[in-house]
Image (cartoon, rainbow, N blue to C red):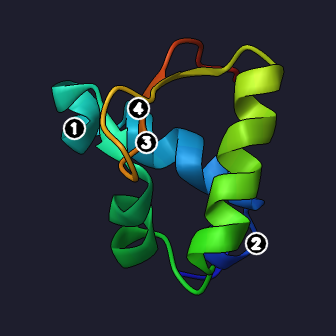
């Protein structure tokens, strides 16, 4: 869809996490790599860290090498 490709990475992550698939709450960093393309894991991780600093997501580092993310605020 053309409108999806025009969205910023942050918008695409927020849209994905707030959609029906977001009902589970937590997403592993690598999960986004398969659902939000064509971004690399490094780009996704950088944006998720930025979103955490901005108070949009929270992270769970309880498992080594498997950070999980949860949307805590949806901005219009």
Give the mark nearer the N terminus: 2 vs 3.
Answer: 2
At horizontal 52% and vertical 12% (from top left) the residue drawn is 72
Q: Is residue 9 above or below residue 56?
A: below
What residue is disc 1 on? 20
At horizontal 82% and vertical 20% (from top left) the residue drawn is 54
> Which numbered circle lies on residue 6?
2
Secondary element under disc 3, as helix, strand or loop, is loop
In this view, which residue lies farthest toward the front?
A: 64
Q: Position of residue 73 (x, y in %)?
A: 59, 13
**Spatial separation of the CA atoms under disc 4 and disc 3:** 18 Å
Give the mark nearer the N terminus: 4 vs 3.
Answer: 4
Which residue is more in the foreground, 76 or 30?
Answer: 30
- The reply to whether callout 3 and callout 1 are in contact (CB within 8 Å) is no
Secondary element under disc 4, as helix, strand or loop, is helix
Give the mark nearer the N terminus: 2 vs 4.
Answer: 2
Q: Position of residue 12 (x, y in %)?
A: 59, 55
Q: Is 71 positioned to the left or the right of 8 in the image?
A: left
Badge 4 local density, few (<14 within 10 Å), some, or many (20+)? some
Choose top left, top right, bottom left or bottom right for residue 26: top left
What residue is disc 3 on? 67
Give the mark nearer the N terminus: 2 vs 1.
Answer: 2
What residue is disc 4 on? 18
Q: Is residue 70 above or below residue 41?
A: above
**Spatial separation of the CA atoms under disc 2 and disc 4:** 18 Å
Disc 2 or disc 3, which is closer to the eye? 3
Badge 3 local density, few (<14 within 10 Å), some, or many (20+)? some
Secondary element under disc 2, as helix, strand or loop, is loop
């Amino acid at each position: 869809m053309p409108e999806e490709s025009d969205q910023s990475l942050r918008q695409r992550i927020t849209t994905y996490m707030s959609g029906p698939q977001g009902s589970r709450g937590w997403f592993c960093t690598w999960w986004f790599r398969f659902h939000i393309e064509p971004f690399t894991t490094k780009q996704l991780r950088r944006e998720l860290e930025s979103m955490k600093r901005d108070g949009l997501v929270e992270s769970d580092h309880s498992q080594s090498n498997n950070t999980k993310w949860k949307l805590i605020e949806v901005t219009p």
